[in-house]
């Protein structure tokens, strides 16, 4: 069973029920996937920030596309429309300012998600 | 077929293998663990980051290949899942293949994969349930 109680009255962005269901509630498997997720998303955010600085639209598009699958693992549905828009803008090689705004939202939400994942606990 | 070959065929359980072709490591790990939980009878699950790597080993004839469509996260010039499937099916039309994609405009790809006898599953919340159902079908064959 997963503890999904709100933390400091901040809106929860992760929904761990999906992951827990797929992993049959097995703690060691959930932890393993979470560890991979934390490392991978940090790398993806770094790469995305770098691509935005370089105005590398193709990489922005590819990373936004990949991250849609990555964040779905933790049920972070709030990020789907943000990443979808970033992917489309990257594909069209346009609206860098809008991409920067979306990227700020992405980074903030991911930061919150990291806190939720690190604070994740199993009830006995 | 001689006596021993016939005996072996009758008594040895079929050793199932699954290939996962996915450039998203977290997603691939999740899928691998999921399949191992649901199908303990599967002997081996191999993960490839590109379709080209999988193509080199497709002679092993896995029970099913589960392939992402866009595989260019790490290698910008990596072939798409669909183009790899076309090559695999040309070499062995009996291969069981599932194509995954998180793309929203996928109609052309889904029609093409059907033409090649593959199965298209969108990467959404239902994806793993649909994969499980398809793998069950392939294991029954």
Image: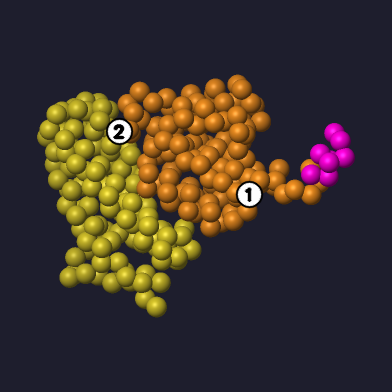
Q: Determine the residue positioned at 32% across, 51% down.
A: A37
Where residue B103 appears, as percent x and y from the top left, is 39, 35
B41 w.r.t. A96: above or below: below
- Figure quadrant of the C terminus of chain B: top right
Quarter of the image where the N terminus of chain B is located = top right
Q: Do the residues labelled 1 and 2 touch (CB within 8 Å)?
A: no
Q: Does the magenta stretch include residue B2?
A: yes
Q: Nearer the viewer, residue B22 or A81?
A: B22
Residue B85 appears at what percent x and percent y?
53, 27
| The residue stretch that appears in magenta | B1-8
- Percent x, y for residue B3? 87, 40
Q: How far apart are marks 1 and 2 (CA)?
A: 32 Å
Numbered circle sitting on residue B101: none
Image hue for chain A: yellow
Q: Is mark 1 on a helix, strand or loop?
A: helix
Q: Label 1, on which residue?
A: B136
Q: Nearer the viewer, residue A75 or B135?
A: B135
């Amino acid at each position: 069973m997963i503890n999904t109680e709100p933390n400091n009255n901040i809106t929860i962005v992760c929904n761990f029920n999906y992951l827990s269901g797929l992993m049959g509630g097995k703690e060691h498997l959930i932890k393993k996937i979470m560890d991979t997720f934390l490392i991978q998303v940090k790398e993806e955010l770094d790469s995305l920030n770098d691509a935005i600085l370089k105005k590398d639209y193709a990489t922005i598009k590819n990373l936004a596309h990949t991250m849609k699958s990555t964040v779905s693992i933790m049920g972070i549905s709030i990020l789907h429309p943000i990443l979808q828009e970033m992917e489309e803008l990257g594909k069209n090689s346009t609206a860098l300012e809008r991409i920067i705004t979306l990227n700020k939202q992405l980074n903030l939400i991911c930061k919150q998600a990291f806190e939720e994942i690190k604070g994740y606990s199993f009830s006995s | 077929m001689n006596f021993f070959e016939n005996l072996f065929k009758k008594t040895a359980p079929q050793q199932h293998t699954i290939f996962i072709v996915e450039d998203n490591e977290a997603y691939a790990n999740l899928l691998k663990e999921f399949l191992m939980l649901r199908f303990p009878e599967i002997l081996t699950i191999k993960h490839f980051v590109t379709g080209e790597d999988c193509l080199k080993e497709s002679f092993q004839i896995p029970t099913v290949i589960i392939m992402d469509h866009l595989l260019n996260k790490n290698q910008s010039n990596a072939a798409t899942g669909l183009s790899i499937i076309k090559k695999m099916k040309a070499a062995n039309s009996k291969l069981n293949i599932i194509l995954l994609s998180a793309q929203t405009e996928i109609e052309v790809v889904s029609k093409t994969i059907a033409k090649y006898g593959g199965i298209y599953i969108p990467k959404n919340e239902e994806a793993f349930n649909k994969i499980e159902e398809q793998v069950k079908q392939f294991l029954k064959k």
